[in-house]
Amino acid sequence: MEKLTASMCQLCILMLMSVLSISFLSAESTDQIKAVSEGVSPSSLPLYEGSIDSTQIDSLVRKETENISKEKHLVSPKALQINQPWHPNSNLSMLFSALLPGGGQIYNRKYWKVPIVWGAFTACIYAITWNQDVYSGYKHAYIDLTSDDPMKNTSWQDYMAPGAKPEDEVNSSALKDRLKRGVDFYRRQRDLSLIVTAGVYLLNILDAYVDAELYQFDISPNLSMRVAPDIAPSRSGGLQYGIGCTLNF
């Protein structure tokens, strides 16, 4: 930019010299015409000091103009984007959230949302793990109870009623039904936890995209809400007290 400014100054100086030279040449031509009319030889007239050839000035002006045009092309576009406000790229925000939940929120500089995203994912992962463990226990116990030798495969005995004997419960249909219901219930809970986790993951990406798109959205400063105590007349003629809410657009 400094080179461009210096070149512009040089061009202005050359143009000024050109104008002065043309005025000198015009004055010299006028004197020569006057001398011819008076019978004086033009060659005997003195030349103006500092007179410059117009062809030489034109070539210098043309050269400086070409240099300025070249310097304009050499100026980096980044140098022209000084003090431009930063705003996030929605595509990058979605990519970061897809790779790491909460990454898009960090990229968008919405740091307060990161604990919410990570907390939601932690709860979902805990629900999946816990339901899977309980489901596996019920399933293993049911398989052992319905096997050919349930007295040898004893995992089902952990689900008997307190004080019950294995010999009495081995052929109990109630225990089999309870184990079967436990298998079905916790399998559904595990699958539901997986669906909720997938929904939280997609919401994390969607939230990052919307935040990036609305980063420069201008909210009017006139939008405000005021909550204050309120007193109003009642139907019985007295006063009733409450809370008033005023929303300004």
Image (tube, rainbow, N blue to C red):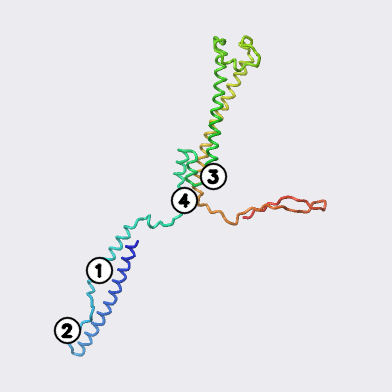
Q: Nearer the viewer, mark 3 or mark 1?
A: 3
Residue lying at 53% horizontally and 36% vertically, measured from the top left? 200
| Label 2 vs 1, first from the N-terminus | 2
- Dot 2: element: helix
Q: CA distance from mark 4 to mark 1?
A: 46 Å
Q: Identify the residue position indicated by label 3 in the image.
A: 112
- Residue hosting label 1: 60
Q: Which residue is mark 4?
A: 87
| Crowdedness near tag 1: few (<14), some (14–19) or many (≥20) residues, C-alpha within 10 Å | some
Q: CA distance from mark 3 to mark 2?
A: 89 Å
Residue 72 vs residue 138, the one in the foreground: 138
The residue under label 2 is 43
Amino acid type assigned to the residue bearing label 1 in the image: Leu
Closer to the camera: disc 2 or disc 1? 1
- In space, the residues marked 3 and 4 are separated at their CA atoms by 18 Å
Assess whether mark 4 and mark 3 are in contact (beta carbons under 8 angstroms). no
**N-term-proximal mark, 3 vs 1:** 1
Q: Which mark is in front, 4 or 1?
A: 4
Quarter of the image that includes the C terminus: bottom right
At label 3, the amino acid type is Trp
Q: Could you classify mark 4 by the number of other residues whose Cα lies within 10 Å: few (under 14), some (14-19), or many (20 or more)?
A: few
- What type is the residue that disc 4 sits on? His
Q: Amino acid at mark 2?
A: Ser
* Residue furthest out toward the right: 236
